[in-house]
Amino acid sequence: MRLFITIVLFTTTLFAQTTKAPTNPKLKVAYFASGCFWCVEAIYESVSGVEEAISGYAGSTVKNPTYRTIKKTGHAETVAVYYNPKLISYAALIDVFYASQDPTTVGQNPDFGHNYRSIIFYNNTDEREIAKAKFTDINTRYQGKAVTEIQQIDKFYPAEDYHQDFEKRNPDNSYIKAVSIPRLKRFQENYKNTKH
């Protein structure tokens, strides 16, 4: 019985979600999905003007998704990006979004599928118009092959704690070494407004 209780407590703690969003009222939040959220979180946290990025789930009306359920719920791995609008604009965050991915694929190598799809979420009509204009430019550049969705954010669910800052906390993880760090480095080579 003692072993059972220990396992239940460990599992509950491991898969718990206690991540708190920044409380600075000067920050705004934008939401992006473009493949594995470990990669996307690290990319946005490398950008000047971004204070925090939180991994989570969005893009479906099903409530309370988890990492184990998102293939069935229709959510995409999404990152909430907390940024200072005096230092970086929403339009510039979309530039980061497109500079860090291939917008013609449903997911990013090696992660493909519905839960890794490319989505720009907007909070209001101004953001929607900026997202549409940026998509039009990208779609023209990629000869009509861009697959990025543009959706109003309905609900963002922060991911389980073990997903937060995963790249920073697990630099020797095989996926991080083979996929996330190379993706971040490719982005940093092409985008100059990063923290060094």
Image: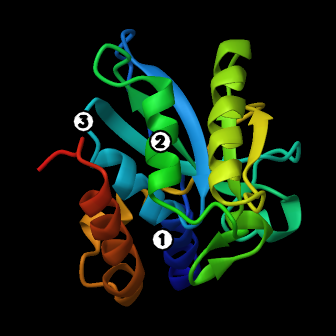
Question: What residue is drawn where x is 50% and y is 28%?
Answer: 91
Q: Nearer the viewer, residue 3 or 37?
A: 37
Give the mark, 1 or 2, whose residue is nearer the N terminus.
Answer: 1
| Residue 87 to residue 189: above or below | above
Instruction: Tell me where residue 168 appears, x and y as whole percent.
Output: 26, 63
Q: How many marks?
A: 3
Instruction: Tell me where residue 29 appears, x and y as whole percent.
Output: 50, 26
Please name the residue that numbered disc 2 is placed on.
95
Question: What residue is drawn where x is 56% and y is 73%?
Answer: 5
Left or right side of 135 for 96: left
Q: Nearer the viewer, residue 90 or 11?
A: 90
Residue at the far top: name it. 25
Element at label 3: loop
Element at label 2: helix
Residue type at tag 2 = Asp
Question: What residue is drawn where x is 58% and y is 66%?
Answer: 102
Please name the residue that numbered disc 3 is placed on.
48
Instruction: Tell me where residue 148 appears, x and y as whole percent.
Output: 72, 52
Frontmost of labels 3 and 2 is 2
Q: Nearer the viewer, residue 67 or 178?
A: 178
Left or right side of 195 for 169: right
Q: Mark 3 near mark 2, Cβ–Cβ under 8 Å?
A: no
Give the mark, 3 or 2, whose residue is nearer the N terminus.
Answer: 3
